[in-house]
Amino acid sequence: MFRFILAAVLTLGLAGPAWAADSNNLQVFNGVSKSVQRYSFFTIFDSVHASVADGVVTLRGKVTMPYKATDIAKRVAKVEGVTQVVNRIEVLPVSQFDNQLRHGIARAIYSNSSLANYGLGPNPSIHIIVEHGKVTLDGVVMNNMDRQIARTVAGSFTTFGIKNELKTDEEVRQDLEKL
């Protein structure tokens, strides 16, 4: 259960010290996290990171469809304590190659016996973002070995580059302690 909560937090990103001292911003951040995670069209092919400062939420990331960026911003605006939403979510370009790549990598990662447990639940913790053939792995895994396995699995596909932004539970724990 702890990993699922951390996955939800990390998928939305951890803001910097600007809001660390203010517990109201932490409460807003938690509400934003829940709001995005509960959005039924948020998939493993989308990644949204949020930062909060004095009730102003800045959203960054990439989504596969334009309506997702708009819907997420509208949902976040309704979270208690949010005074403004700055929507910097980018929409990934439509590409058959990118689509085939993201689906192939997802199947390979979530069917890998070492990584299959990450696909359990309504919001799998490894997100696969593909833009112009460049792959970014985002989310939370239990340990460095799983991060390396996910990178290796993604590397078995023909891509124009792979960026591994997966964090371990321990790294997320350390980030949360800084808050």
Image (cartoon, helix red, strand yellow):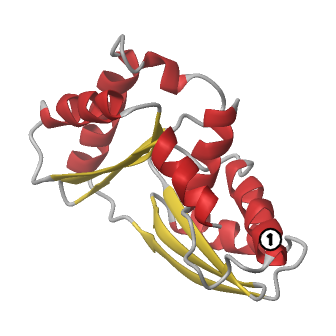
Which residue shows up at 37% across the image and 64% down it? 92
Q: Quadrant of the N terminus?
A: top right
Which residue shows up at 44% across the image and 47% down it? 45
> In which quadrant of the rendered view does residue 133 lie?
bottom left
Which residue shows up at 64% across the image and 73% down it? 70
> In which quadrant of the rendered view does residue 109 lie?
top left
Q: Position of residue 129 (x, y in %)?
A: 35, 52
Q: Front-most of 99 and 81?
A: 81
Q: Is residue 107 above or below residue 84?
A: above
Residue at the right extreme of this rendering: 80
Q: Which type of secondary structure does the marked residue at label 1 adopt?
A: helix
- Amino acid type of the residue tagged 1 in the rendering: Val
**Residue 152 visible to the viewer:** yes
Instruction: From the viewer's perspective, tell me whether residue 95 is left or right of residue 47.
Output: left
Instruction: From the viewer's perspective, tell me whether residue 65 is left or right of residue 86.
Output: left
List the residue tagged with mark 1.
28
**Residue 44 visible to the viewer:** no
Q: Front-most of 10 and 162?
A: 10
Which residue shows up at 58% across the image and 22% down it? 120
Q: Position of residue 41 (x, y in %)?
A: 63, 49
Residue at the top extreme of this rendering: 113
Q: Is residue 2 above or below residue 40?
A: above
Q: Position of residue 160 (x, y in %)?
A: 9, 54
Q: Quadrant of the C terminus?
A: bottom right
* Mark 1 surroundings: few (<14), some (14-19) or many (≥20) residues within 10 A: many
Total numbered labels placed on residues in the image: 1
Q: Is residue 80 above or below residue 149?
A: below
Instruction: From the viewer's perspective, tell me whether residue 147 is left or right of residue 42.
Output: left
